[in-house]
Amino acid sequence: MNYQPSDFLPILVQLVAALAFIVATMLATHWLGPKRHSVLKDDAFECGIESVGDARTPISVKYFLVAILFVLFDVEIIFMYPWAVNFMGWVKSTSDVAITMFLEMLVFMGLLLLGFIYVIKKGVLTWEK
Amino acid sequence: MNAIIALSLFGISNLFLGFLNNRKILLPATLVFILIALGLNFADWNHEYYWFNNMLKTNNLSVNFVTIILLSTFLVVAISRSFGDDDEHSHPAEYYAILLFSAVGAIMMVTFENLIMLFVGLEILSVSMYVLTGSDKRSLRSNEAALKYFLMGSFATGILLFGVALVYGATSSFDIHGIAQGVAKAKEQMGGAYGPLLYSGVILIMVGLLFKISAAPFHFWTPDVYDGAPSIFTAFMSTVVKTAGVAATYRILSISFPSVYGLWGNPLVYIVCATLIIGNITAVYQQSFKRMLAYSSISHAGYLLITVLAKRPETNSSLLFYSLAYAIATITAFAVLMVVSEAQAKNGKADESFEALNGLANNNPLLAFSLTISMLSLAGIPLTAGFFGKFFVFSDAFSNPSSLFKWILVIAILMSTVGIYYYFKPIIAAYMKKGEVAKIELSPLYKFILILTTTLTILLGLAPDLVKNIF
Amino acid sequence: MSLITLIPLFPLIGFLINGIGFRHVPKSLAGIISSAAAFASFACALTLFLGFNGQPQIVHLFDWITVGTLNISMSFQLDQLSLLMLLIITGVGTLIHIYSIGYMSHDEGFGKFFAFLNLFLFFMLLLVMGSNYVVMFIGWEGVGLCSYLLIGFWNKNSNYGNAARKAFIMNRIGDLGFLLGIFLIINHFGSVEYSEVFSKIAEGGYSSGDKTLFYITILLFIGAMGKSAQIPLYTWLPDAMAGPTPVSALIHAATMVTAGIYMIIRSNIMYSLAPETLDIVAWVGLATALLAASIGLFQNDIKKVLAYSTVSQLGYMFMGLGVMAYSSSFFHVMTHAFFKALLFLGAGSVIHAMSDEQDIRSMGGLRKKLPITFITFLIATIAISGIPPFAGFFSKDEILAHVFEHNKLMWAFGVLGSIMTSFYMFRLLFLTFFGEFRGTEKQKHHLHESPIAMTAPLMILAVLSAIGGFFNFPHIFGGHASLAAFMEPLFEQSAIEHVAVDESLEITLMIVSVVAALLSAGVAYFIYVVKKTVPVAEGEETGLQKVIYNKYYIDELYDTLFVKPITALSNFFREVIEFLVIDLIVEGVGKLVKTLSSEVRLLQNGTTGYYIFAMVLSIAAILVWSLKSFLLG
């Protein structure tokens, strides 16, 4: 099947429409909404407590580590969706491709597990030492 | 190709070895791992074979490149001295593991059959390098270098991917042989002319790779990053990464795009000349030995690219020989630099200037001698490996009928005379300048590596055919 | 690994052990290691010799340089010539190693000395074993280096250093000729392998007097002049006596200086086709023999006499080569190696006993104190003077007989030379060992016979000097000339015409030279033993004697002819050319590069944004340039 660039025109139209909607609504709220400035109103809202110090205080590196690990494993899980969707198809097929695929996923999971063990042993997930 | 699998597993096992309370085991273990991988690599000798659904392909050329990469890795690991005794701030297990992982990336870069594998290999190598560059967490320079490298590296990766996408658009293939067919087909259909898609794609891929081997004008990251990174990783970068980068560039240009030589050859001529001139000329003024080596690595990228450009049947062996000679000499130089700069440290900061080498020969004859041989080899003085490296490269260029190569040759020869000036600076400092370097105690392994690399350099300078016949 | 490869390997290993381990290897061990290395090589050489079947053998180690069609390999060739040389080098070498253990025992640089000796052996073996001219050249240069190192071994004395430098420079002049010869061979034959070059000549139908061959042979002969100390490049050899005496024996008498003769015998095919060169070789040899012998007449330094005697004997060998008596020359190389090594070692023994005194005017009457040294020295003296039945007689007379066939006048000069030889050798012997002791009391008290390590080699060499002549016992005495027969295959391809010498004539010639030698020995006996004449002190010589004592002022002549003009020229270059060319142009270029560098360096300003901007700009430029056809339509 040969695609011509013109076949992708609907995608372009959709992209332009989406962008235009966002820009338009942002501009609209900006122009339409009334503005009243006061000291209290412009103050940073801190649940009723008066704000103290700088917002850019150092945060424990553990926080980032946990966050990045979450993202990491989360992304790996995504690989399993297409695999799982296709797996029944392989099982039904006559060849032994299903076994191969199963083993490959096992290897993949094994590597992930090794990584997880490493993370735990490294003490990344223990919040307080 | 089992080397890839083995090295990946070894890398993981290295991570777990780190949990043992015995740091001493890491260095020998890593060395053994690399040797095993080297052995597995030789199993592919004389077998042309496709791996992983045609993703990788091994042949003798790739085996030779992998050998150089693993040998360099071996030497770098051997001179790492377990990364010091600072338990709190150094993580030898992780460093060794990352080195092994990046070797995997480098191997993928020299065996790829599919552009996706090129990208994956390149990323494995680059990301590892970003991390290792910043591994000296308390040093501002190291942090700055890592961030700079990361920023510019990701930029270059983007360019490479863009190029890959455009080439796919033009030839509808990721496979490097498939691309070659696609180019041929396009030529047939378009009557000798190609669309802008292919033109831009080829150039962007080339630029993305040239960035990694720091060819001018994409070299700007090199001095800052090499200077900022811990010396041991600079040694790794300037040998393994460069070899892999040049091999990848050569592979894709010679397999996929030989029929559009004019397209990438013309800009490459100017790039080569710019690289030679900028690398050599700028090195002259440097006061820091390490920074000088960074510029030296830029200039050697220029020499290596001459063979890629010359496109001769001998290119394979010239490229391999030059890479080998360069890698060995560079690692020797870094080995000396590391111990001397630490011994001469001021206020806890390693002194990497030329002055640190003053009077080195008085108490440390072995270090001074190894340094001398490596510098002579880098400068291309006869009876060292570097001379024959340059000789083969130049004769490749000379035997190319195009008159353009005569001019490249003139520039290359002029620039190698400039090179002699700055390569002799450390030798002069070590032997003639007054100064005091206390006797530096070296471990037996360290001494062995110094003697080994020095001997190899001289041996290859005496009898280059020993190796050249294999290549 | 074959035995052939082992031969040079042993001394190399010895050198590495002693060289790297200098000051770490204990003294007692260093000498033993070196001597064992030399002996192991000798044993290998002997085994090969005994098992030799007459067929040349080539051992290919590896391809060394491959450039275009020229292929230079590292390979060894074993044939009659290299085998004999191997035996001489390793055999005499071993004896001298053992001797040195005793001689150098008090020296600080003991280990260094043995390292150098082993290195010398290695290169010398390379020289004679190489199967092409380039390997020979490596050995050639290597032995030159070792010679330099060993002449200047006592490097705290600047005179010795100068002597070493002189040897090196003189040799370089010769080496240049050799090198040019090799280039010409490569240019003309496209190969440096002996076998290829020689078979090309044999099959190429070269006529006698071919121009190319003339140039090649002359250039090679210039190389030989330097190494084998022929006029005009001989003056370094007497000065080379500054080195330790075993070195003089091994390098400057028995082995290295015969390298030139080896080379010419090796290239005999070319020489046989170049009669002009042969004439030059013969006359240069004769002139050298006479000049050196006459200088030897009035020298007072025991080693200097021997040095001039060496130069003179080398002259005889070249004279033999010049009349195509290759095997006779080689025979003389061999016997000379025995008796000259013996003479030097004997002199060493004397010097050792005299606490480093070398002036024969202060010696005398040593035969009672040093009996073994005396007897062996006597044997060597008789041998070199050409008195039967000792070795020198046979070899020298063989050369003279061939010379007689070639040119009667040359023969007459040759006999004159041997008269002088006999005179100065017996003069040396009588002044040293006969009469009354003329040295100081302290020296007299110290006199002693040398240790067994030194006398044993003396005795072995004395036996060889005595019987060495029978290796090539001539036909007229019922011998088989076995050496000549053994070497015969080497000359198969060259066009040598030998006129059979009339037997009665040959015997007459022998009688003439023997009587002459005996007579001059008698004269020496009369002057120095009966009349007890002692050479006059320094500076009191008169007339011709003064000229000869000062070596005909050859050194001074060279100084005026070559050294001074060159110094003047180099002054001119230093003052004028250096300023105009070096300072202005060369340094200017250097400064230009430096200035450029300081400017280009500023490109690297550390700002990531700027770096990326430069990259993008470059990519854009390349793209625009490549795509200009599309952009412009």
Image (cartoon, coloured by chain):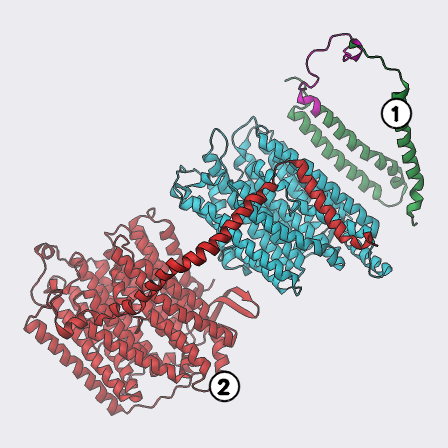
Chain colours: A green, B cyan, C red
Q: Position of residue C297 (x, y in %)?
A: 17, 73
Residue C140 highlighted magenta (yes or no): no
At horizontal 71% and vertical 17% (from top left) the residue drawn is A55
Residue pictured at 90% horizontal, 35% vertical: A16
Quadrant where the C terminus of chain C is found in the figure: bottom right
- Marked residue chain, label 2: C
Callout 1: chain? A
Q: Is there a contact, CB below 8 Å, between mark 1 and mark 2?
A: no
Q: Which residue is at 29% across, 52% downward? A: C110
Q: What type is the residue that disc 2 sits on?
A: Gly
Percent x, y of residue B365: 41, 45
What secondary structure predominates along the stretch shown in magenta?
loop
**Percent coordinates x, y for residue C500 in the rendering:** 32, 90
Residue topped by disc 2: C205
Instruction: Return the residue nearer the eye: B287 or C439.
Output: B287
Start and end of the magenta stretch? A40-65
Residue at mark 1 to residue at mark 2: CA–CA distance: 103 Å
Coordinates of residue C181 in the picture (x, y in percent): 44, 73
Residue in front for this viewpoint, A43 or B375: A43
Identify the element where label 1 is drawn: helix
Classify mark 2: helix, strand or loop.
Answer: loop
> What amino acid type should be assigned to the residue bearing mark 1?
Leu
Mark number displayed over residue B385? none
Say above or below: C70 vs A23. below
Residue B194 seen by the camera: yes
Q: Dot 1: within a 10 Å radius of its alpha carbon, few (fewer than 14), some, or many (20 or more) residues? A: few
